[in-house]
């Protein structure tokens, strides 16, 4: 590799990592409380642990009675995780999210295992209060709870309910760096989960097209990031391509960790494409 090309490659990698790290740091306070109000953050929920935690919420146009059956089905080998099944199944989890209420899954009991995959069942149901609380906990070797996942349902009026989800950790169980590493994939899956639960409870069927568009807009931003980056390393007057590539890195952070509406994802990806085309024309 020629010295100038190597220098530009290292510059691109360094600046891209800086954008990703700073972008995530800037968005972290928002995605850890995505959709949650000050009241949601302050309320006590069953099984709260004293370490790191995050609280997320969504308003659903349905009564608690209509949301509750979907929650009771959670778990691998049951109703799934209401998220990106294809991504979980790439990891061998064998998840199949239910698109209907399954009667035989409507009677979980305290102590019932909640599985992540067919062979990994680290948690057990620890609270069931109909139409109010449903959650599970994982315990350490000494039987002490180390992780809590709990849903809460709070009526806003006769037709709308607030669905709040909280995860909390025992402060001695996981180092802070491990919790941060866990929260990154958790954010992606949990925001999709809340969106899908909202759709299910409101009577809207699964949207394969919507999920496909989410993936396509993400891949478009990634493709533009890589394409512009390659053009920057190969062209002497490549600064416009560097700007496009770094902009694409910023967009990737946004659409990954804030679960933006499809139209906004598409608009951002289109803007990146226009920037790439303009840069190509100017460098021709």
Image (cartoon, rainbow, N blue to C red):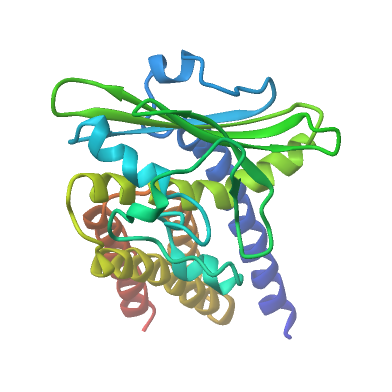
Viewer-nearest residue: 270 or 147: 147
Viewer-nearest residue: 180 or 132: 132
Height in image: 112 above or below 215? above
Height in image: 141 above or below 153? below
Viewer-nearest residue: 250 or 145: 145
Residue that protrudes farthest toward the left in the picture: 158
* Left or right: 135, with 97 as reference point: right
Q: Residue at x 34, y 64 (%)?
A: 272
* Left or right: 59, with 176 as reference point: left
Position in image of residue 192 (x %, y %): 39, 51
Residue 138, located in which quarter of the rendered image?
A: top right
Q: Residue at x 53, y 59 (%)?
A: 76
* Left or right: 222, with 175 as reference point: left
**Looking at the rendering, in which quadrant would you find the C terminus?**
bottom left
Position in image of residue 270 (x %, y %): 27, 65
Viewer-nearest residue: 250 or 259: 259
Position in image of residue 228 (x %, y %): 47, 73
Height in image: 96 above or below 283? above
Q: Residue at x 66, y 53 (%)?
A: 121
Position in image of residue 40 (x %, y %): 41, 20
**Looking at the rendering, in which quadrant would you find the N terminus?**
bottom right
């Amino acid at each position: 590799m020629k010295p100038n090309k190597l220098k530009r490659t290292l510059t691109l990698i360094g600046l891209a990592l800086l954008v990703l790290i700073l972008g995530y740091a800037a968005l972290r306070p928002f995605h850890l409380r995505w959709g949650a109000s000050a009241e949601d953050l302050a309320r006590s929920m069953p099984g709260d642990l004293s370490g790191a935690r995050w609280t997320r919420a969504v308003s659903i146009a349905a009564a608690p009675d209509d949301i509750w059956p979907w929650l009771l089905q959670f778990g691998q080998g049951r109703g799934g995780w209401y998220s990106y099944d294809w991504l979980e199944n790439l990891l061998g989890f064998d998840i199949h999210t239910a698109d209907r209420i399954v009667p035989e899954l409507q009677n979980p009991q305290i102590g019932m295992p909640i599985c992540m995959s067919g062979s990994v069942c680290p948690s057990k149901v620890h609270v069931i209060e109909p139409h109010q609380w449903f959650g599970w906990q994982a315990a350490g070797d000494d039987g002490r709870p180390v992780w809590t996942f709990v849903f809460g349902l709070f009526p806003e009026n006769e037709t709308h309910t607030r669905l709040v989800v909280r995860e909390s950790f025992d402060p001695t169980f996981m180092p802070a760096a491990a919790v941060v590493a866990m929260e990154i994939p958790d954010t992606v899956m949990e925001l999709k989960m809340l969106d899908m639960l909202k759709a299910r409870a409101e009577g809207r069927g699964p949207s394969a097209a919507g999920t496909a568009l989410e993936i396509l807009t993400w891949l478009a931003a990634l493709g533009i990031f890589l394409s512009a980056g390659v053009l920057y390393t190969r062209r002497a007057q490549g600064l416009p391509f560097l700007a496009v590539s770094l902009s694409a890195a910023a967009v990737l952070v946004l659409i990954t960790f804030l679960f933006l509406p499809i139209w906004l994802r598409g608009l951002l990806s289109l803007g990146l494409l226009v920037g790439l085309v303009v840069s190509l024309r100017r460098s021709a």
